[in-house]
Image: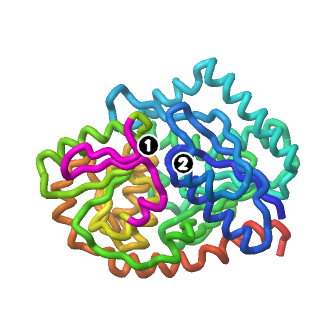
């Protein structure tokens, strides 16, 4: 079968999921013929993705989060208003038309949508005769049995609308989850394990060296991290970010180093760190749990708040509002124990689950 991927490019999670799924499909003798990545003005596609996806890649302009100046948290209302500006809408119309042209050009047997909203609009608006399956942790928000999906408030409502829009045109939805649960047939949702890269799954060895690892999507968090590191010079930190205004590796303080996103270095430090601090992106939380690392999650928007609440309710992390690591240092001696063991067992079912859903289900086997 021939697959075309459409991937949300915000952060690294959806990109690494696409890499993992491409490897699974190729091992089964299938082909990824094209990859389309939704980009924003402030993000670049990481070099590791372009190097490893082994398929032609094109980008298109996609909706982006908005932050108040100097703030660390996403303003969802401002995000909606900013993305409705006429100039942005014109760009998104061009993107929808571009996605349509690529689907018609490559004629895939199936489109895999990694939580990118504009691909659904292309398939729906132009009534394209192609099957499309949605892949993402966010689709749990539409599952009637998901304990975090009934959250109230404007931000939670806006998130659910975004999830519904990204599900447009999809024949079915594959919801990535930390743990197994029953699907929701009425809403075409199947629960599947996370998609971790082979570099993670094939190297289970890890250690506990004397440093904390961090990963931030919003660079405004850097000021909080620097302030804490100055007050705690004996605690070494390595933090990954996507800030092109600084060198590949920047020694901000004697005990604090910022690194540009680098997949191999990140995984090496993940395996060796004594704890992991992040803004609660689903993918890196999955990697830290695989390596049985204590975690502190500092969510920057409602989607990450839900990820963090999910992880905390499963007793695999603590949650904070800021990068004040004093509480986390007290938490560092703890491991995830049974949760990590059960999680690895669940992960072992990943390839079979995706083969069933993307290949056998497509053929009605």
In primary-sequence order, the first of circles 1 and 2 is 2
**Left or right side of 241 for 5:** right
* Residue 147 visible in the picture: no
Q: Which residues are magenta?
A: 246-268
Q: Secondary structure at mark 1?
A: loop
For the residue pair 174 and 68, the one nearer the viewer reads as: 68
Answer above or below: position of 34 versus 17: above
**Which residue is painted at 68% across and 22% down in the image?**
90
**Which residue is painted at 60% across and 46% down in the image?**
8
Answer above or below: position of 88 versus 136: above
Q: Is residue 264 magenta?
A: yes
> Few, some or many C-alpha atoms within 10 Å of disc 2 (few <14, some 14-19, many ≥20)?
some
Q: Is residue 163 magenta?
A: no
Image disc number at residue 46: 2
Image disc number at residue 242: 1
Colouring scheme, one of rainbow, by chain, secondary structure, one colour: rainbow
**Which residue is painted at 53% across and 34% down in the image?**
64
Which part of the image, by quadrant, shows the C terminus?
bottom right
Q: Secondary structure at mark 2?
A: loop
Residue 33 pos. (x, y %): 79, 55
> Few, some or many C-alpha atoms within 10 Å of disc 1 (few <14, some 14-19, many ≥20)?
many
Real-space Cα separation, disc 1 to disc 2, in angstroms: 9 Å
């Amino acid at each position: 079968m021939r697959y075309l991927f459409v991937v949300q490019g915000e952060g690294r999670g959806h990109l690494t999921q696409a890499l993992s799924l491409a490897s699974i499909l190729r091992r089964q003798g299938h082909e990824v013929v094209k990859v389309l990545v939704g980009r924003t003005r402030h993000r670049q596609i990481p070099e590791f993705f372009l190097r490893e996806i082994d398929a032609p890649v094109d980008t298109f302009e996609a909706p982006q989060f908005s932050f108040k100046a100097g703030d660390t948290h996403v303003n969802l209302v401002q995000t909606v208003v900013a993305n409705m500006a006429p100039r942005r809408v014109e760009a998104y119309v061009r993107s929808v038309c571009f996605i349509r042209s690529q689907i018609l050009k490559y004629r895939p047997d199936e489109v895999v949508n990694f939580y990118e909203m504009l691909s659904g609009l292309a398939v729906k608006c132009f009534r394209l005769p192609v099957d499309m399956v949605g892949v993402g942790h966010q689709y749990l928000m539409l599952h009637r049995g998901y304990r975090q999906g009934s959250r109230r408030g404007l931000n939670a409502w806006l998130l659910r609308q975004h999830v519904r829009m990204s599900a447009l045109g999809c024949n079915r939805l594959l919801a990535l989850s930390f743990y197994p649960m029953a699907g929701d047939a009425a809403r075409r949702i199947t629960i599947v394990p996370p998609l971790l890269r082979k570099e993670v799954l094939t190297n289970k060895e890890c250690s506990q060296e004397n440093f904390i690892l961090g990963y931030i999507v919003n660079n405004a968090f850097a000021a909080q991290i620097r302030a804490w590191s100055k007050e705690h010079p004996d605690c070494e930190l390595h933090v990954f970010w996507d800030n092109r205004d600084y060198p590949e590796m920047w020694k901000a303080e004697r005990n604090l180093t910022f690194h540009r996103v680098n997949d191999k270095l990140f995984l090496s430090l993940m395996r060796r760190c004594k704890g992991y601090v992040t803004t609660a992106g689903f993918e890196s939380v999955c990697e830290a749990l695989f390596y049985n690392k204590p975690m502190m999650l500092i969510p920057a928007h409602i989607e990450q708040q839900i990820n963090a609440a999910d992880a905390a309710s499963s007793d695999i992390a603590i949650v904070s509002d800021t990068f004040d690591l004093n509480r986390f240092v007290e938490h560092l001696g703890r491991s995830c124990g049974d949760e990590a063991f059960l999680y690895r067992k669940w992960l072992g079912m990943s390839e079979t689950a995706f083969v069933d859903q993307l290949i056998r289900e497509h053929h009605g086997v």
